């Protein structure tokens, strides 16, 4: 999966939150949220269809995301780790945790690490 552009993520966010919807309804939502015009929405949807991330079918040009939010998050995280931390998850976590975390977050992380081992 390629890197996501901000515009692609905006379309996907609406589809993840609202589910399947017509391209027209999607364009209306994005106009309200981001001030996009209909052509902008249709252009981004077409790119997502070509990438295999969105399916658009007739009648009504119904659009549905073919990638989950979790899959997209995982891919974007992998891209970030690869690009900024030479693929090292340890370096990524070290940088991430250097800002500090709450006791509750630390407990949740400990539990996740214990489940991995």
Image (cartoon, rainbow, N blue to C red):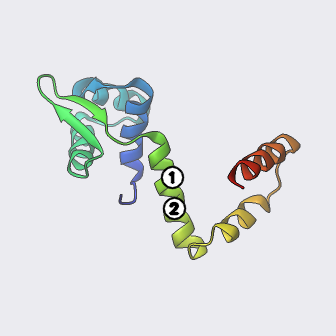
Q: How many marks?
A: 2
Q: Secondary structure at mark 2?
A: helix
- Classify 10 Å Cα crowding around label 1: few (below 14), some (14-19), many (20 and above): few
Residue furthest to the front in view is 117
Residue found 36% across the figure and 32% down from its top: 30
Residue located beneath label 1 in the image: 74
Residue found 23% across the figure and 34% down from its top: 38
Percent of width and height locating residue 55: 23, 37
Residue found 71% across the figure and 60% down from its top: 96
In the picture shown, does residue 21 fall above or below 1?
A: above
Q: Nearer the viewer, residue 56 or 106?
A: 106
Could you tell me which quadrant the C terminus lies in? Answer: bottom right
Residue furthest to the right in view is 103
Q: Is residue 58 left or right of residue 11?
A: left
Residue furthest to the left in view is 59
Residue found 71% across the figure and 48% down from its top: 115
Could you tell me which quadrant the N terminus lies in? Answer: bottom left
Q: Secondary structure at mark 1?
A: helix
How far separated are the C-alphas under marks 2 and 1?
Answer: 6 Å
- Classify 10 Å Cα crowding around label 2: few (below 14), some (14-19), many (20 and above): some
Percent of width and height locating residue 36: 33, 37
Q: Would you identify the image quadrant in which residue 3 lies? A: bottom left
In the picture shown, does residue 23 fall above or below 74?
A: above
In the picture shown, does residue 101 fall above or below 97?
A: above
Percent of width and height locating residue 54: 27, 40
Dots 2, 1 in contact, CB < 8 A: yes
The mark found on residue 10 in the picture is none
Residue located beneath label 2 in the image: 78
């Amino acid at each position: 999966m390629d890197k996501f552009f901000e515009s692609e993520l905006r379309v996907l966010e609406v589809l993840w939150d609202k589910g399947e919807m017509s391209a027209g309804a999607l364009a209306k939502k994005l106009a309200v949220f981001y001030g996009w015009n209909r052509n902008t929405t249709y252009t981004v949807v077409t790119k997502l269809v070509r990438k295999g991330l969105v399916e658009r079918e007739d009648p009504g040009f119904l659009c549905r995301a073919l990638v989950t939010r979790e899959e997209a998050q995982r891919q974007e995280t992998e891209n970030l780790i690869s690009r900024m931390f030479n693929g090292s998850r340890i370096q990524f976590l070290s940088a991430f945790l250097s800002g500090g975390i709450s006791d509750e977050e630390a407990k949740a992380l400990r539990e996740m690490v214990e489940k991995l081992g």
